[in-house]
Amino acid sequence: MELRINRRSLIVLAAVGALSASSFAVLRPEPGGASSHREAPMIAGDPRNDNTDVYGFVSPDKPDTVTLIANWLPFEEPVGGPNFYTFDTKSRYNIKIDNNGNGRPDVTYQWTFRDQDKRGNSTFLYNNGPVTSLDDPNLLFRQRYTLKKYDAKHGWTTLIKDGIVAPSNVGPASMPDYAKLRAQSLHKIPGGGQTFAGQADEAFFLDLRVFDLLYGGDLSEVGQDSTKGYNVHSVAIQVPKDELAVKGDAKRNPVIGIWSTTEKWSPTGYKQVSRLGNPLVNEVVVPAGLKDTFNSLSPDKDAGIPAVVKRVTDPELPKLIEGIYKIPAPKTPRNDLVEIFLTGIAKANGPIKADLNSQILNKDVDPKTFRPSEMLRLNMSIPPAAKPNRLGVLAGDLQGFPNGRRLGDDVVDISLQAVEGAAQTGKLVDALAAGDKVDANDRPFQDKFPYIPLPSAAAVNTR
């Protein structure tokens, strides 16, 4: 399959290589820095603050808006009562937007949570009868949230003061119409848009046995969706494109960078303990000794870490694949991966008549202030695909990953192809064409906001 992408060596890459080794001083870890699907050592013991995935895409049914989703709490067993899953009331959950390419947040949406617990010492139950609405007195435990927005023009403003979190899905006897509860939990935002917080099905589909030396060494360990049946806790927001763009003009400045963080309270104040932009970066690019530190940093610090930049330009995974499957590793330095992970994809010549998602392309961005940084980049001007392809950009579907990330994008198969040089050669690697043989989520996505599937109520070991 031919790609429709050509690359150029960006001048910013030279700036990365010129950074001095003295920048390595920022790698001193602070307590608690970590993130994603158990991808960093310290966060594995703190799942409520473990940010698992970030999604950003032009809303398919409202293409004048963008939907942003971030998930926490990996591997929620649906029947894990009577104390079901909750957001951490001592943490701040953020989705951040860089719209001028300097690696710093220009727009931040921040959720904080509080408990409303009516159980006291009288019962162990989460609900003492069927729950037919979010204000049903049978629902004995709720969480509520405050949503704030930051931008340079207005500073911090409160968008929602008393939002209600969609509860955990206890089961059909307790919640006979969970879809109704989900619908009631959606809240309108002043100025246009809406938001959601609550439980959802884990939409990241993949076979995690990849860590058994790449599927058993002979691809015998593929085809099993490791996250099937599990839930997560999600926050989602849908806003007009201009809310996110430089100078409020998405037509002139369509490319944004997206990432999420968790900031946890400590005796010395809030500390960032989780960070996530592109999927799988911390898991298979960053080495173990740097994982916790990587997640405590702001993206504008990324280019100042020679050790991390080297893991992008000279990654470990292709060498592992070559050693096990004898597929030659692409030549280094991997400028193609620098574009995917640190700068956005830019063209030289070829069928694409405009660059894909490099922030240098925004009309009101000064290239001199651009800084390579790891984040999920989205070109908001590319309309939703009529027939989305799970392999996204690599299959010619320019609205897919790594141009943002949709719920149906098969990021494991895309990432394996990318690290094996598909974006260098313009062709998919035939030996890896089948990927992990998990090509879709087990539960259907919704056709309206927040799009994420309804949470499962069945025990994982019954599936």
Image (tube, rainbow, N blue to C red):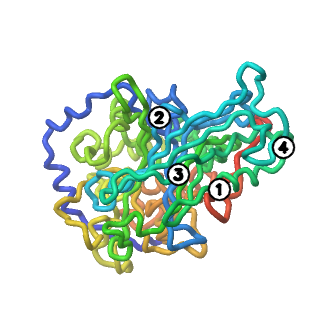
Marks 2 and 4 in Cβ contact (< 8 Å): no
Residue 158 visible in image = yes
The residue at the point 21 percent across, 56 percent down is 13
| Helix, strand or loop for disc 3 | strand
**What is the x, y in percent for residue 243?**
41, 65
Q: Which residue is mark 1?
A: 440
Assess disc 3: are there few (<14), some (14-19) or many (≥20) residues with their C-alpha within 10 Å of its C-alpha.
some
Q: At 13% from the left edge and 42% from the top edge, which residue is drawn?
A: 20
Which residue is at the far top? 121
- Amino acid marked by disc 1: Ala
Return the disc, 1 or 3, that comes first in the chain's sequence: 3
Q: Which residue is mark 2?
A: 91
In percent of width and height, residue 215 lies at 57, 41
Give the spatial CA distance, label 1 vs label 3. 34 Å
Pointers 4 and 3 in contact (C-beta within 8 Å)? no
Percent x, y of residue 118: 71, 30
Q: CA distance from mark 4 to mark 3?
A: 30 Å
Residue indicated by mark 3: 160
Query: Looking at the image, which residue is at 52% across and 38% down?
Result: 37
Picture layout, residue 136 above or below residue 121: below
Which callout, 3 or 2, points at the residue further toward the start of the chain? Answer: 2
Frontmost of labels 4 and 3 is 3
Depth order, front residue of 229/6: 229
Q: Nearer the viewer, mark 3 or mark 2?
A: 3
Q: Amino acid at mark 4?
A: Pro
Mark 2 or mark 1, earlier in chain:
2
Q: Left or right: where does residue 351 sit relative to residue 195?
A: left
Most foreground residue, 307 or 334: 307
Please tell me how many numbered marks the rendered image carries: 4
